[in-house]
Amino acid sequence: MKINKINNSKIISVSDVHLGYHRSNPDKFNAFLSTLIKNPPEYFTIDGDFLDLWRAEFDEIIDSHKETFKLLKTLGRKGTKIIYILGNHDYQIRKHKDFFRQFPNLKIYEDEYICKYRSKTAIKPV
C-alpha cells in the first residue's frame, strides 16, 4: 500500500486489508487511516475482505487490532461516512454486527450494494 499526499478527496476506497491474516500489514493501514483523519474524506468505503475470518476468529482479530478500530472510530467522529461492503472473507460478520454499532457513521452492506452520492445512485441493488 503506497501512501501519497491526500488532499480534498471526497471518496477514498480500500479493499482486501485482510486483518487477521499474517501477511496483512496493519501498521501501514493504520498509517493510512492516520493520514485520512488529518484531512477526512466525505466517504470512506471498505470494499470487502477488511477482516479475514477464514484465517482467524473474530475476537482474535478485534483483540489484535485495537489501534485500527480506534482509528476507524476517530474517522467516523470526524464526519466521514464509512461504508463497509462485505466480501467473501468477512461475510460472517453478520453474527457480530453489534460490535460495529459503536462506530460513528458506519453502515454495513450485506446484500444491498447501493451507494448514493449527491442524490445519484452509483451502484444499483443486486
Image (cartoon, rainbow, N blue to C red):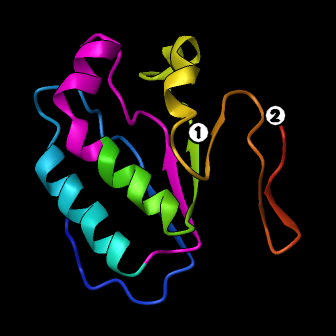
Which amino acid, by three-letter code, is at mark 1? Ile
Neighbours of disc 1 within 10 Å: few (<14), some (14-19), many (20+):
many
In the image, which disc is placed on residue 22? none
Question: Which residue is rendered at x = 27% and y = 85% of the image?
Answer: 5
* Residue 54 seen in render: no
Q: Does residue 120 lie above or below 14 as drawn? A: below
Question: Looking at the image, which is closer to me, 102 or 82?
Answer: 102
Q: Are marks 2 and 1 in contact (CB under 8 Å)?
A: no
Check if residue 2 falls in the magenta segment: no
Q: Distance of mark 2 from mark 1, alpha carbons?
A: 13 Å
Which amino acid, by three-letter code, is at mark 2? Val
* Residue 72 seen in render: yes
Question: Looking at the image, which is closer to me, 113 or 57?
Answer: 57
Magenta region, residue range: 40-68
Question: Looking at the image, which is closer to me, 120 or 35?
Answer: 35
Looking at the rendering, in which quadrant would you find the N terminus?
bottom left
x, y percent for residue 125? 84, 40
Left or right of 52 on screen, residue 108: right
Callout in the foreground (2, 1): 1
Sequence order check: which comes first, mark 2 or mark 1?
Answer: 1
Where disc 2 sits, the SS reads loop
Neighbours of disc 2 within 10 Å: few (<14), some (14-19), many (20+):
few
Where disc 1 sits, the SS reads strand
Left or right of 126 on screen, residue 90: left
Question: Which residue is rendered at x = 88% and y = 70% of the image?
Answer: 119
The residue pinned by badge 2 equals 126
Question: Which residue is rendered at x = 35% and y = 16% of the image?
Answer: 53
x, y percent for residue 24? 17, 37
In the image, which disc is placed on residue 85? 1
x, y percent for residue 74? 40, 58
Q: Does residue 25 lie above or below 3 as drawn? A: above
